[in-house]
Amino acid sequence: MRDLVNKNIGFLSNRELELILMSSIEELNLVANSGAHRSTTYLAVSAIEGLFAELIRLLNIQPSDVPGAWPINPRSTTPKNRKKLELHEKEKVLCAAGALPEGFERLYEPVRGFRNYMHPERELKDKKPIQQSVGQAAVACLNAVIEKYSAQRFAANHVWKLVHGAARVPADETIKMIPSGRGALLVTNAAANTLTRMAFRLLIPPGAIFNLVFNYSSIDHWRAARVEGRLATDGRGQDNGLIECWAWGAWANSGRYTNASEPDPKLRQHEVEVLLDPLGSFQIIVDSVRLELVAGVDWAFDPGGQIGFMTECGLVSIVSKRLSNHTQAIRHIQLLRSNIPRQQGLVVLQ
């Protein structure tokens, strides 16, 4: 049996919704392959509906982001609560935010009405049969939405790009990196010069490797600051330091940390803070100590590159820690003022 429906819904952080939708997709593949066009249409449109509300939440779309498109409460002039939006209103909001695939509305418009055929009186009134083309169009709509977001992850009010391997977001402020092949790699959508500060707690089991990637321009070109979970015979990390990649699968250490600044490889968790200067400098602080490279080695930080996380082996987690200040207003990122108390949360502030 062929899988006619894309199963890559790992971008969802709501585990219960993911399980429900995955169950629907498994069943949808069965009925689509058997030629049950009615059931195919019902299940596909239902799954699409299930994604609409979650996408609005994940993308953190606000009424101010879609002026004129967000519905107003009928008895007031205030925007409707997100949880009270009707299905067609959710679609309208997503369309206005540019959050749906190109051409989606044109393909979905003639399909969604067939969802009401679950009530026979509606089909009796319309007298339009659900044929193979209808079922296929419904599946195409669902696949288009899933494909648009399959390589994206949403954490700390930010959109990330999954470049390689697997990464889960079991909670809105937690990322679990799952190596596959040569590793798992997740990077920000924006360049480093739009960021000011990242802060998170790193959970690293024995034998694992974590790389804080920077200067990322492609999967074949990046640099990284490594935090080791492997212990060498001298008590230091086996290969701690600056890692340079010149082709995927081909990277090496190009400079060790100083003895005084190297993170302790025996620790199973680290507090990590990255301070970025839009003009071109940055600092990486691990367990309150700034990482320093041995003499003659420079980070060669490029503020125009992207920044992200990579693990080569071991299940590494980046979990909530604290929020910080920010100076720019960028979409999807929560803005905080200096007089707001510290809160809990993995932070990537643009």
Image: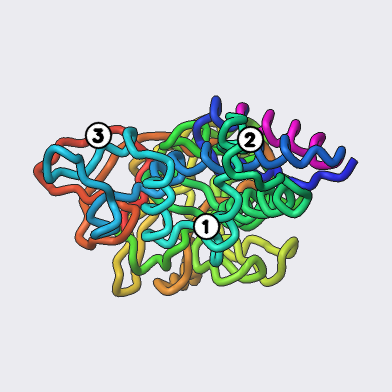
Q: Quadrant of the C terminus?
A: bottom left
The residue to which callout 1 is attached is: 187
Q: Where is residue 222 drawn, in percent x and y?
A: 58, 67
Q: Where is residue 324 drawn, in percent x and y?
A: 24, 46
For the residue pair 120 and 243, the one nearer the viewer reads as 120
The residue to which callout 2 is attached is: 315
Eye-nearest disc, 1 or 2 = 1
Looking at the rendered structure, the secondary structure element under dot 1 is strand
Q: Magenta stretch containing residue 176, yes or no? A: no
Q: Where is residue 179 drawn, in percent x and y?
A: 69, 44
Extreme-right residue of the structure: 1
The residue to which callout 3 is attached is: 343
Judging from the image, the colouring scheme is rainbow
Whole-number angstrom distance, CA of label 2 to CA of label 3: 26 Å
Above or below for 175 versus 258? above
Residue at x-position 35% and y-position 45%: 347
Looking at the rendered structure, the secondary structure element under dot 2 is loop
